[in-house]
Image: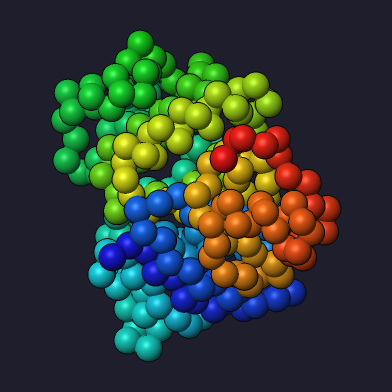
């Protein structure tokens, strides 16, 4: 049992209708800016509340409008990486990682995560002293320290240049394979999804259009049968899947 999302929420200009499930896999929510991708993540995390529907994770109900269940974010075991990483600016790298552990913080417990994400030498540095890649590794280390049941990534590569993006995509993919957790990865970039996603759930005008394999989705783009988003009919270089 993984993540199950079936929700509705009225937004300005459209109604969010998100329906999908994710097991221990990387599921890409792919769609243009403003189509409801980030709002979907916020509803899963408990930052926003849907108008109706149900969200469950590993058999545990996080939200159910009929039964009036709406667990607070701290009880959902969700690891959320925001677009800007949301590191605490007044905390060192070590303390940012420890913050992921909640109330039970032992400074020595951060060491395995610092080593794993290759930021041990930056333990006493502050976010403003880090490169974009180092910030992302710190954010991932903080998520791992939470021991979440699901990982949510909100356009984690949007602020990176092409070369660094390619490197960090590879690194993050290795981390997520090790975590073996349901992961929902939001992007409007086809190339990123090509690199990261194994399952794709396109979104258009606030509505999910069904989950399919990445290979099937890109085959549809290649032969022009996807018919989802104008201008997305270009297949990335062959051999990258």
Q: How is the image coloured?
A: rainbow
Query: Image height check: is 204 above or below 218?
Result: below
Could you tell me residue 128's position as x and y percent?
53, 21
> On the rendered image, what quadrant is the N terminus found in?
bottom left
Residue located at (70% from left, 76% from top): 14
* Residue at the spot 37% in from the left edge and 18% down from the top edge: 119
Q: Which residue is drawn at 51% across and 73% down?
A: 19
Along the line of sight, the residue nearer the viewer: 114 or 222 = 222
Residue 195: tell me if it is visible.
Answer: yes
Q: How many labels does the image show?
A: 0
Q: Which residue is at the far top? A: 121
Residue at (32% x, 15% y) in the render: 120
Is 70 located above or below residue 122 in the figure? Answer: below
The quarter of the image holding the C terminus is top right
Judge by depth and name the residue closer to the eye, 124 or 140: 140
The spot of residue 220 in percent (x, y) is: 70, 58
Please determine whether, in this image, residue 150 is positioned above or below residue 40: above
Q: Residue furthest right?
A: 231
Q: Where is residue 204 in the image (x, y as percent from the top left)?
A: 70, 67
Question: Could you tell whether 100 is left or right of 6 in the image?
Answer: left
| Front in this rendered view, residue 36 or 171 | 171
Asked whether the viewer can see residue 232, the reply is no
Of 140 and 176, nearer the camera is 176
- Using residue 33 as the reference point, say whether residue 5 is left or right of it: left
Residue 225 in the image: x percent, y percent?
A: 75, 64
């Amino acid at each position: 049992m993984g993540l199950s999302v079936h929700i509705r929420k009225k937004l300005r200009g459209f109604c969010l209708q998100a329906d999908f499930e994710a097991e221990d896999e990387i599921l890409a929510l792919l769609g243009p800016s403003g189509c409801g991708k980030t709002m979907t993540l916020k509803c899963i995390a408990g930052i926003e509340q849907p108008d109706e529907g149900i969200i469950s994770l590993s058999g545990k109900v996080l939200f159910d409008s009929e039964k009036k269940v709406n667990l607070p974010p701290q009880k959902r075991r969700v690891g959320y990486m925001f677009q800007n990483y949301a590191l605490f600016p007044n905390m060192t790298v070590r303390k940012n990682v420890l913050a992921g552990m909640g109330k039970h913080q032992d400074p020595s417990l951060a060491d395995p995560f610092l080593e794993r994400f290759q930021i041990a030498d930056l333990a006493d540095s502050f976010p403003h002293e880090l490169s974009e890649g180092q910030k992302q590794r710190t954010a991932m280390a903080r998520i791992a320290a939470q021991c979440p049941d699901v990982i949510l990534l909100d356009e984690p590569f949007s602020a990176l240049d092409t070369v660094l993006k390619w490197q960090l995509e590879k690194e993050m993919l290795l981390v997520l394979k090790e975590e073996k957790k349901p992961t929902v990865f939001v992007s409007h970039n086809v190339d990123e999804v090509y690199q990261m996603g194994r399952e794709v759930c396109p979104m258009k005008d606030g509505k999910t259009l069904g989950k399919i394999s990445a290979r099937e989705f890109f085959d549809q783009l290649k032969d022009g049968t996807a018919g989802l988003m104008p201008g997305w009919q270009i297949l990335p270089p062959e051999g990258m899947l």
